[in-house]
Image (spheres, rainbow, N blue to C red):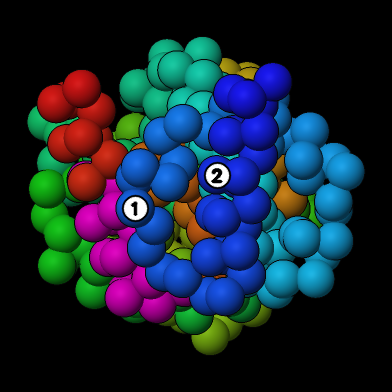
């Protein structure tokens, strides 16, 4: 009984200090607290949380961190399960192949925010060369988007993906078959071979697998970026991407030390 009273007195002291806005608490005030007694007291006095914005905000942030951690874990599991797709010869990539940090961009050639983000991504790539950048074709704007995605895969087979990709991402011309083939010729591609490779059933199957990966990662629109185990949606700046790359590097370094 005396032990329980001591715990409750300690708890009351800690909660009083929190209510008064104390930023740091002496460890001697908290070490003796038993979680069961803390829970019992808070269930009996929920107003302590509800009436204190700082405590309520701290609880909300703790829930958010836990949910973000759970989502990141699920995302890593999805990426591991689709590792063969990410290493597929159909998947264009740039940057370093010898790195633990990967950025995947899901995009559509008819997506205006994708085009707006393109120079930002290029700047981030120049700032962060020790990253592998994968290009995830996610054509969601109709048949011309699908044909452009197939053409990009075919261009990758000829080793000219980046030149072709740059042309499609920077043009103001309406995307149609005539424009796609003209861009291919401008990029130095063998257009007849490109057209034949675009009809390859394996290219169609690959695009379906990329779409399935996007759905598993809860990617619902373009552009979307998977940076390590984090997801960035919508138009981004080079600073946004660089900051997330730095966070992911810190996470990987911490994991390696654990």
Name above or below for residue 11 compared with residue 123: above
| Residue found at x 34% / y 53% | 26
Where's residue 188, x and y in %? 27, 57
Q: Residue at 54% of width from left, 54% of height from top?
A: 14
Residue wearing tag 1: 26
Q: Nearer the viewer, residue 74 or 255?
A: 255
Q: Earlier in the sequence, mark 2 or mark 1?
A: 2
How many residues crowd around disc 1 within 10 Å: few (fewer than 14), some, or many (20 or more)? few
| Dominant SS type (magenta) | helix
The furthest residue to the bottom: 172
Structural distance between the alpha carbons of marks 2 and 1: 11 Å
As drawn, the label of residue 10 is: 2
What is the span of residues highlighted in magenta in the rendered image? Answer: 236-249
Image coordinates of residue 62 in percent, x first then y, are 59, 49
Query: Which percent across, then down, holds residue 149?
Result: 56, 47
What is the quadrant of residue 155 in the picture? top left
Q: In the rendered structure, does residue 244 fall within the stretch colored magenta? A: yes
Q: Quick check: 183 above or below 103?
A: below
Q: Residue at x 41, y 26 (%)?
A: 86
Residue 226 visible to the viewer: no
Camera sees residue 242? yes
> Under tag 1, what secondary structure?
loop
- Position of 9 compared to 251: left or right? right
The answer to whether 178 is drawn above or below residue 190 in the figure is: below
Return the residue nearer the eye: 136 or 1.
1
Residue 175: where, in percent of width, then height? 63, 70
Residue at x 53%, y 75% (from the top left corner): 21
């Amino acid at each position: 009984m005396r032990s329980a009273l001591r715990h409750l007195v300690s708890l009351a002291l800690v909660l009083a200090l929190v209510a008064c806005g104390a930023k740091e608490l002496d460890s001697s005030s908290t070490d003796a607290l038993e979680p069961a007694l803390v829970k019992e007291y808070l269930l009996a006095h929920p107003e302590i949380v509800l009436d204190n914005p700082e405590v309520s905000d701290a609880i909300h942030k703790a829930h958010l961190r836990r949910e973000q951690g759970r989502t990141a874990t699920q995302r890593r599991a999805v990426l591991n399960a689709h590792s063969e797709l990410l290493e597929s010869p159909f998947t264009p990539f740039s940057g370093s192949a010898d790195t633990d940090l990967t950025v995947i961009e899901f995009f559509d050639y008819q997506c205006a925010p994708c085009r707006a983000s393109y120079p930002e991504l290029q700047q981030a790539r120049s700032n962060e060369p020790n990253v592998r950048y994968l290009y995830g074709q996610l054509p969601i704007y109709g048949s011309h988007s699908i044909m452009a995605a197939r053409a990009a895969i075919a261009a990758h087979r000829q080793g000219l993906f980046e030149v072709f990709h740059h042309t499609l991402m920077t043009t103001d011309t309406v995307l149609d078959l005539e424009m796609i083939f003209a861009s291919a010729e401008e990029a130095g591609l063998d257009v007849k071979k490109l057209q034949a490779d675009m009809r390859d059933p394996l290219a169609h199957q690959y695009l379906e697998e990329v779409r399935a990966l996007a759905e598993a990662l809860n990617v619902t629109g373009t552009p979307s970026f998977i940076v390590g185990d984090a997801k960035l949606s919508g138009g981004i700046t080079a600073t946004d991407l660089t900051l997330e790359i730095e966070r992911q590097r810190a996470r990987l370094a911490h994991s390696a030390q654990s």
